[in-house]
Amino acid sequence: SKGGWSSFMAKEIADQPQAVADTLMGRLASDGSVRLSEIDGLTAEDIKNIDRIIMVACGTASYACDVAKYAIEKFARIPVQVELSHEFRYRDPIITANTLIVAVSQSGETMDTLMATRFAKEQGAKVLAICNTQGATLARESDATIYTHAGPEVAVASTKALVAQITAGYLLALFLAAGRNATEQKVLRSLGQELLKMPARVTQVLERLDDVRALGKEMANAKSVLFLGRNVGFPVAMEGALKLKELAYIHAEGFAAGELKHGPIALIEEGQPVIVIVPSPRDSDSLHPKVISNIQEIRARGAKVIAVAEDGDTDVANFAEHVIYVPSCENIFSSILTVIPLQVFALELSSAKGLDVDQPRNLAKSVTVE
Ligand code: M6R
């Protein structure tokens, strides 16, 4: 039931601290070490032999894969390719016995993803599923399954399943990194400990959403909204745009902020709303100043900039019209926090337009046809 919430989506957004905590439970010890007993079937030898990971998924689940790619490559040093299931299946992809396929699906019944994994299995690859539905077809057909414990998701728009998928992706990254000795164990444990703090931070994000709600209502007449991000903020930008399309029927696009000057900046005109996911100023890759200059470039051309930034980032306040602050955390884990205001923004905009947020037009919760 909706348990007093105005929609299933609103309830499922509120369930997110629990979804993250339950997905971590039993897998992350208090010292920060990761244990994934579900994939005990993969021997230490198997893990060492993986030479490539191909992640297959559709829609929102594919953005969870994009986030996982950043974490797996950074910590486990295994090349990761993210593929939309339907595109992957119908070309001639290169799959070997040392390719690990990771299929991500909330329902575990998405036909495109099932077809992609069946195909990969036929080519001799091992398939690991990340799935939210006990006993789903995907789980049954895979060699191993990491269940996301988000609980049943009813609203068509995926929210808590996504944060749970992202959480599982981070766990997998730390697990593979430890198994391959690709990052110092001490560093991995401290990252694990950081991950344990995420449910409380998700709660903090949920406690400060009034501004986002107001913005959503205010912008109900927007004709188009653009989203920009870098690193893990890029898939978050893509997800923000997808949510707005599917729930509010507004034209929206997500871009990697670095792409702006290669084309999309031509879209900017007076009053164009742009939501920018700003990386942490503490980030060692110094992406923060780069994104701040992007904000300056689009502001100079009339964009109305709404930034999602971490607490204490006072710099960004000098350049953006609105700043939505989220608690600070390791930049790589920030996607779990920055995506939430975008979910709420889409929900508010959709309700302000009087639309059915749980059941948008033309869409089904699980797409069981190709
Ligand atoms: O059940 P799945 O995770 O395989 O579903 C994949 C997509 O169909 C799904 O994420 C879709 O994009 C959602 N409606 C997004 O909110």
Image (cartoon, rainbow, N blue to C red):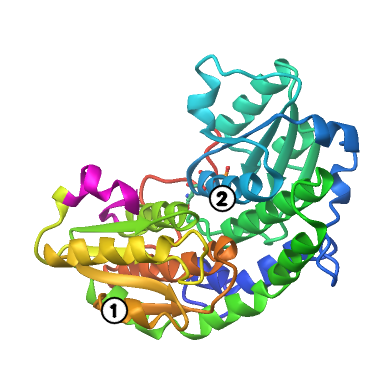
**First in sequence: mark 1 or mark 2?**
2
Give the alpha-carbon distance from disc 1 to disc 2, as whole Å.
27 Å
| Amino acid type, label 1 | His
Q: Place residue 114 in its image quadrant.
A: top right
Where does residue 225 sit, x and y in percent of width and height?
25, 59
Please provide percent x and percent y for residue 147.
Answer: 75, 51
Mark 2 burial class by Cα count in 10 Å: few <14, some 14-19, many 20+: many
Q: Residue at x 85, y 32 (%)?
A: 46
Q: Are marks 1 and 2 in contact (CB under 8 Å)?
A: no
Quickly name the residue at label 1.
Answer: 322
Is residue 213 something one can see in this rendering?
A: no
* Amino acid carrying mark 2 in the image: Ala
Dividing the picture into quadrants, the one containing residue 17 is: bottom right
Residue 240 is left or right of residue 179, and the answer is left
Q: Quadrant of residue 355?
A: bottom left
Q: Look at the image and give the residue range highlighted in magenta.
A: 249-265
Q: Closer to the observer: label 1 or label 2?
A: 1
204 or 230: nearer the viewer: 230
Position of 11 relative to 261 (above/below): below
